[in-house]
Image (tube, rainbow, N blue to C red):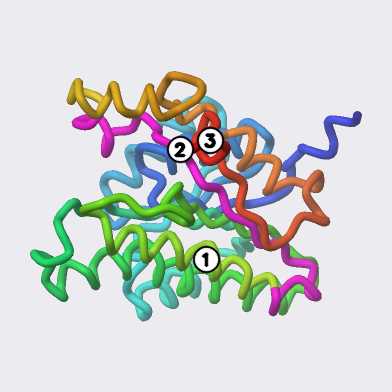
């Protein structure tokens, strides 16, 4: 099999929420496959620091500091990319937050913040990306980041569950409208991954033990475990894969 199937040379990838955590790992993995990277986060200083770290490794990196939940900000950011002649060939909708609280204690503002950050942002950034992909007529790749909660629920994370369930079906809706334009839209459902956001859970013995017992692989996932899947879905190797969610979870979704 030719490595050209997974070669991203000459392509540019925007990864939202990519200054740290899974998003930064996705960005670095795509860069190692040959893509130029557009890093994103709300804080310009954090974006610049993350970009410098990738440039030090020899990668081509652009910076795009904007709030993925702000429609005007998203539109302005894409206008700025247009002005620089930067065309997005690959989008990874990764930005997300978590909030752990029982439904009966949730405020509407808390609910809305999680929905906006995890779901509405994928619509906003995906819409602006697809508009430009369609206008160029060369297709493109969109990868949305879902979760185990795209299919299963767990107590105290209702807005996150609703948002990630929405990501699964937004992926299918995007496919229904854009596949004819040569745009593939797929999702990844990570299992329990060790990141800055989950480190407190890793450090809680009861939860750490539950994850290891619940996961057939008997371990937490690492960001590196996801990189191959995101590169595959961003590459020519997946040109006829559309509207799917691939769970990278050590086997959790396979067992009761």
Give residue 250's position: percent from left, percent from top: 53, 29
**Which residue is located at x 55 percent, y 37 percent?**
248
The reply to whether residue 82 is visible in this rendering is: no
Residue 34's label in the rendered image is none
Image quarter (top left, top right, bottom left or bottom right) of the N terminus: top right
Residue 42: image quadrant is: bottom left
Give the magenta range.
176-201
Q: Secondary structure at mark 1?
A: helix
Which class describes the residues within 10 Å of circle 3: few (<14), some (14-19), or many (20+)? few
**Front one among 169 and 141:** 169
Residue at label 3? 255
Furthest-left residue in this view = 105
User: Would you place residue 124 above or below residue 95 in this image?
Assistant: below
Name the residue located 35 percent from the left edge and 38 percent from the top edge: 20
Residue 117 position within the rendered picture, expressed as x and y whole percent measured from the top left:
32, 64
Label 2's element? loop
Label count reads 3
Work out whether 209 lies above or below 201.
above
Q: Which residue is mark 2?
A: 191
């Amino acid at each position: 099999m030719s490595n050209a199937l997974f070669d991203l040379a000459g392509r540019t990838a925007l990864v939202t929420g990519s200054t740290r955590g899974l998003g930064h790992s996705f960005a670095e993995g795509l860069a190692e496959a040959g893509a130029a990277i557009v890093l994103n986060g709300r804080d310009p200083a954090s974006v610049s620091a993350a970009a410098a770290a990738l440039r030090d490794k020899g990668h081509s990196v652009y910076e795009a500091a904007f709030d993925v939940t702000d429609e005007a900000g998203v539109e302005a950011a894409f206008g700025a990319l247009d002005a620089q002649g930067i065309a997005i060939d690959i989008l990874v909708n990764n930005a997300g937050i978590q909030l752990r609280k029982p439904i009966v204690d949730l405020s509407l503002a808390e609910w809305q913040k999680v929905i906006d950050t995890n779901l509405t942002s994928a619509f906003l950034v995906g819409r602006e990306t697809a508009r430009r992909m369609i206008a160029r007529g060369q297709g493109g790749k969109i990868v949305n980041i879902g979760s185990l909660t795209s299919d299963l629920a767990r107590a105290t994370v209702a807005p996150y569950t609703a948002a990630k369930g929405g990501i699964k079906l937004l992926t299918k809706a995007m496919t229904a409208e854009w596949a004819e334009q040569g745009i593939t839209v797929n999702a990844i459902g990570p299992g329990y991954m060790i990141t800055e956001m989950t480190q407190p859970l890793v450090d809680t013995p009861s939860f750490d033990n539950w994850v290891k017992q619940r996961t057939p692989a008997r371990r937490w996932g690492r960001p590196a475990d996801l990189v191959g899947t995101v590169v595959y879905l961003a590459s020519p190797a997946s040109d006829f894969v559309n509207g799917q969610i691939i769970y990278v979870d050590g086997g959790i979704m396979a067992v009761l």
